[in-house]
Amino acid sequence: MGVSYSDTKNTCMDVFGLSNLLNPSCPQINIQRMLDILSQQDGVQTSANNVNNGMTILSGNADLFNPIYTVSTKATGELNKFPTVDNLMDVVKELNGVGEVGNNMLSEYWSSRVASALFEHELEHELLSMPEFDMSGYPTSNVQLTSSFKAVAGYMKSREYRKVNRDVFVVSQSGYDMHNSDRLAGRFGELNNALADFIQEIKSQGLWGNTVIVQGSDFGRSMNPNSNGGTDHAVSSAL
């Protein structure tokens, strides 16, 4: 990325480069911090969405209260389907709503996650019931990555309903820690197929021109195979 931050002692290039991550004098930037800046601009409504295991990179400035939403890859069912208490969900929301000064920090965090989970469940259940957000035409697959991108495409389709015009989604694909064998072609094949289906759907929604896809890795692999035919950990740029 061609953004630089300079001072009299040091120049920081490549916002996501490994040299910056190892240099304490360079500002550390992640996706949510970018959303923190965008959310303060007039007319910009942002949303940070964790599809599977993206909470860390989405964590921003807590003072700006930009929550991280969890997007489910499975159809949500009805909560409290056979109620013994008619207003159970209202009671749970009240108990886990705004806390009080002096409350235990861990219990407050737990309560906030419960309240967020209920809100997210209600939203997804509502979206699934609306014909305009139907995703039944999207290719089905047993591959988790395909299901993740399908969930992203469905959420992008509902952006106006959610009153959002700047969405960020984090999707992850595991299985690259190949010390004992080389299965890279298979993993890349799944990635290519999942992306092809996603791109086709986004184009049909008319969003391709406004969509940016960033692919990254938490660490690199050695160029030469080890004695097992696999690869070991190696230093690499994050992107």
Image (tube, rainbow, N blue to C red):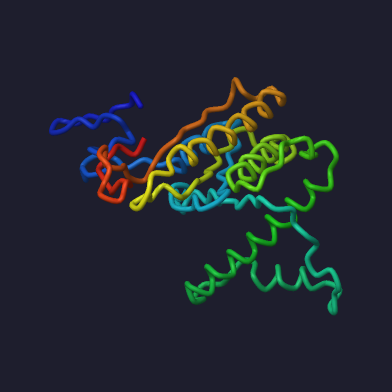
Q: Quadrant of the N terminus?
A: top left
Q: Indicate the position of residue 31 as horizontal and vertical percent values.
A: 45, 40
Q: Of residues 99 and 122, which is closer to you in this image? A: 122
Image check: 96 left or right of 228?
Answer: right
Q: Quadrant of residue 200?
A: top right
Number of numbered discs overlaid on the protein picture: 0
Q: Of residues 185 and 49, which is closer to you in this image? A: 185
Q: Of residues 7 and 29, which is closer to you in this image? A: 29
Q: Indicate the position of residue 207 as horizontal and vertical percent values.
A: 65, 25
Q: Of residues 143 and 25, which is closer to you in this image? A: 143
Q: In which quarter of the image is residue 130?
A: top right
Identify the residue at image location x=32%, y=45%: 219
Image check: 95 left or right of 25?
Answer: right
Task: Identify whether 139 is placed above or below 203.
Answer: below
- Judged from this view, the residue extending furthest toward the top is 209
- Judged from this view, the residue extending furthest toward the bottom is 84
Q: Indicate the position of residue 142 as horizontal and vertical percent values.
A: 65, 48
Q: Quadrant of the C terminus?
A: top left
Identify the residue at image location x=75%, y=73%: 91
